[in-house]
Image (tube, coloured by chain):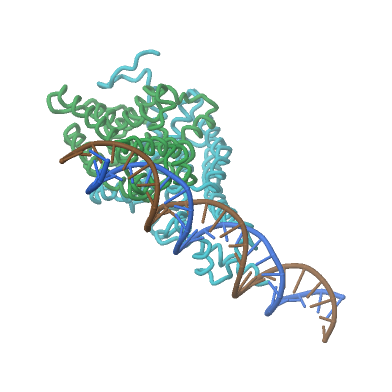
Chain colours: A cyan, B green, C blue, D brown
DNA sequence: GATAGTTTCATACAACTGTTTGAATTGCAA
DNA sequence: TTGCAATTCAAACAGTTGTATGAAACTATC
């Protein structure tokens, strides 16, 4: 059954090429050349180019989501069913940040592929991302338990901002490195996780915007 | 001189189509059909498809950058040459957020085009974005003046996180609305600006990560 | 109203895309 | 070995893409 061999050769070659050169200018012919298989093999084994991309992305997404949930579960068990907000946020952004910025994984094809997927947005991947909401709801629920008094909208904003900082750091790491002329250390992944978690937790635990004292911030008119 | 007419008909049609359907599946033939001009007109007036896209994006970027700098300059003049960190951050994220989320501009083609440009990343636009660094440096300089004692890396992280939250909110506004089941009001643009500026300013003025006590935090020190 | 310079137009081009086809080859069971 | 299914292969297909061409139509100047 050499079929599995062909299948995974295609997957590996595709992931490598997409990671290196982006979805935009990698054709099926590039992939089969890299994998040393026949052009028709892609459609035979995957049905279409889009399904190949989808399989690639689903595989990696599942890995990340599982890591996140494992971290969350571990924290909850440690805390007798309730994790702290720091732990929850850390479980949310840690796996992605470590996966995409981690030094040992610097050359990792999988990580570079996921960065690509977050920069270039191509239809089959977009469709899958839309299903990510159910996954995020689990974190929203955990946050609700960790900060019971908190307004729900505030929780979602905090979760959203945590993801914002994590994803944008991955997307724009080169730009930030250049802008800061190396002063921001993008290799200190643990530090970045602390930073993102710290800011998001701060946003979640500070007084709500409405009540916060301006510190010369322009007062918002009560709608 | 009907040439200008053709030129701007193409620009308008292209911006509209790209805004609606993305760069991926809008062809020159779609554009010229929408603009009611001949196919060859695009290459005649712009040289190539990529140059058309570039011109579109440059025009809008310049607008945004000018708005930002105007706001920054106004705040600096008001403060006798020095703006507060809140004002600087507000000048940075305000124009983009208002432009892309603003209710009156909800149907604005320009805004929707810029959202597309931030979601889908296509080569001619990527090339231009790389030159945005010089523009950001002006804000970094202003921040340095507003928070003179602060470590430089911290300033860049704060600036980076402010942009992270703003851009990600624009990119993922639908997802956030769905995730929060409408509890996060994406139409309250002023509120969102306050929120983003508030969180970023908090991150910038709180104690540095190394010294900070984990968990809940942390009053902002009046400096 | 002839001339020169722009702009428009229909059409063709050349290249590349993902996909399909049908025959060859292979692997394996009876 | 024979038979059957799974897999590979070269080749072609059908469609689309951005771009180029050269003639036609227009515009304005003298």
Query: Which is more toward the observer, A216 or B114?
Result: B114
Residue at 23% across / 27% down in the picture?
B71
Residue at 37% across / 51% down in the picture?
B123
Q: Position of residue A174 (x, y in %)?
A: 32, 51
From the viewer's perspective, is residue A38 above or below residue A165? below
From the viewer's perspective, is residue A138 above or below residue B187? below
The reply to whether residue B169 is visible in this rendering is no
Q: Position of residue A13 (x, y in %)?
A: 51, 65
Residue extending furthest left?
B80
Task: Please give left or right for residue B194 compared with residue B76 in the image.
Answer: right
Residue at 28% across / 38% down in the picture?
B208
Q: Position of residue C30 (x, y in %)?
A: 87, 75
From the image, which quarter does the N terminus of chain A lie in? bottom right
The reply to whether residue B191 is visible in this rendering is yes
Residue extending furthest top?
A222
Residue at 44% across / 30% down in the picture?
A157
State the image quarter where residue B42 is shown: top left
From the image, which quarter does the C terminus of chain A lie in? top left
Query: Which is more toward the observer, A184 or B34?
Result: B34
State the image quarter where residue B138 is shown: top left
Figure label count:
0
Q: Position of residue A101 (x, y in %)?
A: 39, 53
Task: Please give left or right for residue A220 compared with residue B84 in the image.
Answer: right
């Amino acid at each position: 059954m050499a079929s599995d061999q062909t299948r995974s050769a295609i997957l590996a070659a595709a992931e490598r090429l997409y990671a290196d050169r982006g979805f935009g200018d990698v054709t099926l012919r590039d992939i089969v050349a890299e994998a040393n298989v026949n052009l028709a093999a892609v459609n035979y084994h995957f049905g279409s180019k889009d399904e190949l991309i989808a399989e690639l992305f689903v595989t990696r997404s599942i890995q990340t989501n599982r890591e996140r949930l494992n971290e969350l579960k571990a924290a909850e068990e440690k805390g007798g069913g309730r994790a702290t907000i720091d732990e929850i946020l850390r479980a949310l952004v840690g796996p992605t940040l470590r996966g995409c910025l981690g030094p040992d994984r610097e050359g990792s094809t999988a990580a570079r592929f996921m960065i690509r997927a977050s920069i270039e947005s191509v239809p089959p991947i977009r469709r899958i991302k839309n299903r990510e909401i159910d996954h995020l709801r689990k974190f929203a629920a955990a946050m609700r338990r960790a900060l019971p008094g908190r307004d729900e909208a505030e929780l979602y904003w905090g979760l959203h901002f945590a993801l914002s900082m994590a994803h944008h750091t991955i997307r724009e790491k080169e730009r930030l490195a250049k802008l800061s002329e190396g002063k921001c250390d993008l290799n200190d992944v643990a530090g970045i996780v602390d930073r993102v978690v710290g800011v998001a937790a701060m946003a979640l635990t500070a007084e709500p915007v409405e009540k916060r004292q301006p510190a010369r911030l322009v007062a918002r008119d009560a709608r």
